[in-house]
Image (cartoon, grey):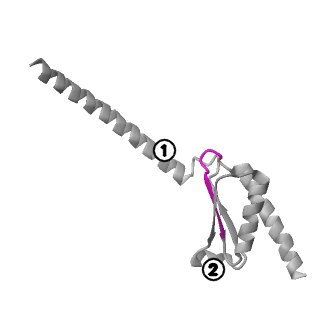
Amino acid sequence: MQLLQKNVVEKKVMTHYVEEFKKRNHAVMNDFIIIGYTSDKSVALNLQNKLVDETGYKGDIYIMQMGVSVGTHVGLGGLSMFFMEKDRKHDGLLVNEMNSLMKKKDEVMTRMAELNDQFNEQVNKQLKK
């Protein structure tokens, strides 16, 4: 009876993960998924197969065993899934970091254009002499 209950719960969990992925996946920013497990890699592989079959996901999927601290707290049979979500820009550390880097890139490009203009002015002055 316990095995049957375990299989029913496992199917519900996997269905939940796939449905949440369908709703929350950020298709542009998400080019990989991480599926974590604590004790049973086959459960993670089953989730991977279900995810690909039901969503047609084509990116990389990494299967990794959870670390000791997380795994101990989650317990045997634990399963997790990481992917980039849409509509989370206000608290998305990665998005905030990307925006910061893009701003810095724009500042560098502006400064490079200024330096290029100054260089060209100096060259033109030297050529006129």
Q: Which residue carries the number 1 mark?
A: 99
Name the residue rendered at 63%, 76% in the picture.
71
Residue 17: give its label.
none
Q: Is residue 29 magenta?
A: yes
* Residue 18: % across, % down: 76, 57
Q: Label for residue 72?
A: 2
Residue 94 in the image: x percent, y percent?
Answer: 52, 52
Residue at disc 1, secondary structure: helix
Amino acid carrying mark 2 in the image:
Thr
**Total marks placed:** 2
**What span is colored magenta in the figure?**
27-36
Residue 13 left/right relative to 114: right
**Which is more N-terminal, label 1 or label 2?**
2
Where is residue 36? Give x, y as percent. 65, 68
Judging from the image, what secondary structure is the residue with disc 2 in?
Answer: helix
Q: Is residue 82 left or right of residue 101?
A: right
Quick one: 10 or 62, which is closer to the camera?
62
Residue 64 place in picture, x, y as percent: 62, 70
When asked about the image quadrant of residue 81, the answer is bottom right
User: Which residue occupies 63% across, 80% down?
Assistant: 72
For the C terminus, give its image quadrant.
Answer: top left
